Each structure stands twice: as C-alpha cells, then as structure tokens.
Amino acid sequence: MDRRLAGIFASLLFLSGCDLLTDCSFETRSVTASGRLVENGAELVRAETGVSAVRGSLRSKSFDYVVEGPPLQGHVLAITLIRAGEPGARLLDIPVRSLSTTVISTGGMTQREGEVTPALGGLYEILSANLGILELTTDLPSRSRILIPLTVTNKIDWYRPNNCY
C-alpha cells in the first residue's frame, strides 16, 4: 500500500510540472528603477535600470541598463552608479555605448557564483531603497556632471518561479 501511495504522489508531482530538483530548487528577486532629468519642460536624459538575483541551486546576479538622451548624445564620457549620501563611492562603472542618435548606453552585466567581476553584490538593496544615482560625466562645460536619481518602478522580493511551492 505504501508503494502505491508513493507512486501516486510521484505521478502527481510529474503531472503538475513541478520538478523539485530543478524548477523548485532556487529563488529569484528583481527590482527596476528609473529616473530622468527634465530641463525647461524638455527631457534631457532618462535612464532605466534593473537588478535581479538568483539563489539556491542556481546563483547569479545581473544588472541591466538603458540611458537615453538625444541632447547629450556624443557628449557623455562616463556613466557611474553611485549611492545617495556617498558621492565618492563608485559602485559600478557603466560602459558608454553610443548605438543611435538617442541611446547613450545600453546593455547588461552578469556575475555568476565564484566570479568577482562585475561586482554586483548589494545593488538590489541600494536600488530597492531608492538610493541609486547615475552620475554622467560629459565634455560640456556647463554640464560636466549630471546626476539622475533612480526611483523604484517595480520590486519583487524572493520567490520561487513556475508556481511551484
């Protein structure tokens, strides 16, 4: 009788699509944040960022970003993620990738378990607390430094994907 119940239980797990060894052995979380600078009613620059992390049988962190601003196109020399209240602390350098007439930089970074670069640890906590700021350095004398505070637009704390609980 015990073997029969075990077989039924295993069949139910299989049919439900919940594979406890893969789909249910990790959790994920993410936060997205954006900011923009408007000057005289016109948008000068806007940014969207996202941080996600996976823990459990799979472990990694990722950071994605898009920085757009036609008026600044070709003038941005560097982009740095800093923490509010700690202006000298550089958290992450973001490459300037001029791909079009509006995009200043776009891309993503992934840190897998055991890797030290890019150092993405702690970014979820900083962005989710609305403490992230993008600092743009330009070659414009009147705007050599532009700060874009990032505000949370979506936040999902640790959860198990695939509706498998």
Image: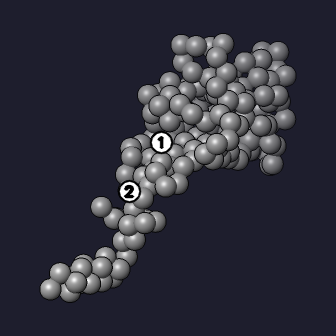
Above or below, 107 against 94 in this view is below
Q: Nearer the viewer, mark 2 or mark 1?
A: 2
Q: Quadrant of the C terminus?
A: bottom left
Q: Which mark is residue 160?
A: 2
Q: Which residue is mark 1?
A: 31
Q: Is 156 on the left or on the right of 54, as rendered?
A: left
Classed neighbour count for the residue bearing mark 1: other residues with Cα under 10 Å, few (<14), some (14–19), many (≥20)? many
Residue at the farthest front position? 2
Residue at the farthest left position? 1
Above or below, 28 against 38 in this view is below
Locate residue 111, reporting x and y percent. 64, 44
Whether the residues at callouts 2 and 1 have beta carbons within 8 Å, the answer is no
The residue lying toward the viewer, choosing from 76 and 86, is 86
Locate residue 140, reporting x and y percent. 82, 21
Q: Quadrant for residue 63, please give it.
A: top right
Q: Which mark is residue 129?
A: none
Locate residue 52, reporting x and y percent. 52, 46
Q: Quadrant for residue 160, please give it.
A: bottom left
Q: Is 75 on the left or on the right of 133, as rendered?
A: right
Above or below, 4 against 71 in this view is below
**Amino acid identity at mark 2:** Arg
> Which residue lies at the image location 15% right of the left edge and 86% below the top edge?
1
Alpha carbon separation for disc pair 2 and 1: 16 Å
**Amino acid identity at mark 1:** Val
Secondary structure under the numbered disc 1 in the rendered image: strand
